[in-house]
Image: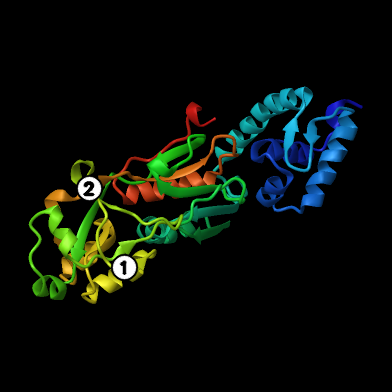
Amino acid sequence: MSIFDRVDLSDLRVFLTIMRTGSFKGAAIQLGLTPSAVSHAMRRLEERLAAKLLNRSSRAVSPTDVGRELAQRIEEGFDKIGDALAGLDAPGSGRFGELRLNVFSDAAHLLIAPALPEFARQCPQVRLTVVVEDRPIDIVAEGYDAGIRYGHYVPEDMIAVPLSKAQRWVIAAAPSYLDAHEPLKHPDDLLRHTCLQLLLGDNSSYKWELSRGRRLRVPGAITINDTATTIAAAKAGMGLAYLLEQRIADELKQGSLRMVLAEHAAKGAPFHMYYSSRRHKHPALRTLMNIIRRQQGLAEYAWSARNA
């Protein structure tokens, strides 16, 4: 019996996942297993190979020289298997399974929600989980297949695919507020107005960014970390709000909000879908990305060698 016949491929997958996440806990979360099951799989693999693959301590896990070499060799094989499965569109193929995404609230509203009906039609067997939160996370360690963030917030070791064109950040307020206060003609006029403060996902306060890279710390006693609540407060006449223009397109069209200082609007990064360059390429993820890109007026995206 050869070594290949003695080894379970699922154990090799556990080993690779530990290498990618850097911990038994991260691998367990990503694979949907218990930490004890991950540990047992590693012990079984090392026993069958008669080789130590990982150095374990209470604080870290690191590969041995043998483990590092094995990971490099088998990862290419797993990628080829993944590519073969991803290329199948027939019933019962790689479109089935589960897809877990972590996205921030504006992306959920603008990109995910409009794409869901078409995605459900094209991938009826896929179990899609969308977790909406604005805090920065490690998507691999927390068991997600992909995430959506602005391009400049995507970690450098991830593959990032643009889902939209560049965004515009604008300042808007209700007509009732604008009619009751002095007009805004220059960005410095913001310092004499009531502004709804923006709280980022990491709980830091955001300076309003205008054109030419100018950033202002604006006055205002109310701080909100949710776009929908900010829009509601602005429509109620509670102050000026700093928002994505696309996010308030309906309000601007209906007149419940009016843009001010439009010539000073800031150009922001596009939305990006991102995923680990080492993760198996899920065919349903490609389908979802292409639905979103078509709806946003972009060409379809195809996997290429740079995604391997």
Locate residue 58 relative to residue 86 in the image: left or right: right
Residue under the point 36% across and 66% down: 224
Q: Mark on residue 266?
A: 2
Give x and y (percent) for residue 207: 30, 53
Q: Which residue is mark 1?
A: 230
SS category of the residue bearing label 1 = helix
User: In the drawing, does residue 275 fall left or right of residue 190?
Assistant: right
How many discs mark residues in the rendered view?
2
Could you give the CA–CA distance between mark 1 and mark 2, rounded to whole angstroms?
A: 19 Å
x, y percentage for residue 88?
Answer: 57, 40
Residue 6 shows in this picture: no
Residues 257 and 221: in front is 221
127, 134: nearer the viewer? 134
Question: Depth check: 118 or 64 in front?
Answer: 64
The image position of residue 222, as x and y in percent, is: 32, 70
Label 1, residues with CA under 10 Å away: few <14, some 14-19, many ≥20: many
Amino acid beneath label 1? Thr
Which circle marks residue 307 in the picture?
none
